[in-house]
Amino acid sequence: MRGVALASGRVAHVRPVEHIVTAIRENRSVVKDTLGMEIWEYWDQDPETRAAMTEHLVEVNEATGPAIQRHYDLSRFRRIVDVGGNVGFFLAYLLEAGQGATGVLFDRPEVMAEARETMAAKGLAERVEFVGGDFLDSVPPGGDLYVLKGILHDSNDEMAARVL
């Protein structure tokens, strides 16, 4: 819970939450209104906030990854594409469960260097293709499993439909 506590106390989390009623009534993000830029841009300018959020995401993946490994047979998948996969912690769980699979970690170019380090530390870098991009524009082709974990909740209905 350390990561969630650190992330939740940061300006990037608190300021938008102060305007949650507007966000709900208008079905839109208020992040740019409150921070002056989109959340990803803010994180790029504030490494401490990005580190706190990454720590939180690691904690979430540590809670969900083992359950996925236990309850889902991933052995039939050959190419797993993790859309918006941050630095790759969840993809690592999937690749450990799907021993014969390769993975594509698809997220913003700004996180790819850290993603490479994460996958190298887990001994999985040789099985992963690192692709930087914007999932609102396109996603890498050729996957037989696409994972959209933890990304749609940041979107309004129109954006979520576009991603899907």
Image (cartoon, rainbow, N blue to C red):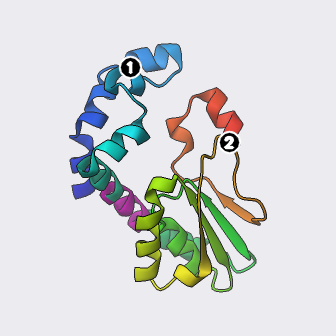
Whether residue 99 is situated above or below residue 161 in the rendered picture: below
| Residue for point 70% across, 47% down | 138
**Magenta stretch: includes residue 81:** no
The magenta-colored residue range is: 55-63
Q: Secondary structure at mark 2?
A: loop
The residue to which callout 1 is attached is 33
The residue to which callout 2 is attached is 137
Amino acid carrying label 1: it is Asp
Nearer to me, 75 or 121:
121
N-terminal of the pair, mark 1 or mark 2, is 1
**Magenta stretch: includes residue 61:** yes
Amino acid carrying label 2: it is Asp
Q: Quadrant of the N terminus?
A: bottom left
- Whether residue 73 is visible here, answered yes or no, is no
- Whether residue 120 is visible here, answered yes or no, is yes
Q: Give yes or no for contact between labels 1 and 2 (Cβ–Cβ under 8 Å).
A: no
Main SS category, magenta section? helix
Whether residue 134 is situated above or below residue 39 in the rendered picture: below
Q: Position of residue 137 (x, y in %)?
A: 68, 42
In this rendering, position of residue 154 left or right of residue 16: right
Q: Position of residue 110 (x, y in %)?
A: 45, 54
- The image quadrant of residue 80 is bottom right
In this rendering, position of residue 70 left or right of residue 120: right
| Residue for point 70% across, 35% down | 161
Q: Quadrant of the C terminus?
A: top right
Q: Position of residue 38 (x, y in %)?
A: 43, 32
Q: Position of residue 9 (x, y in %)?
A: 21, 40
| Residue for point 52% across, 52% down | 108
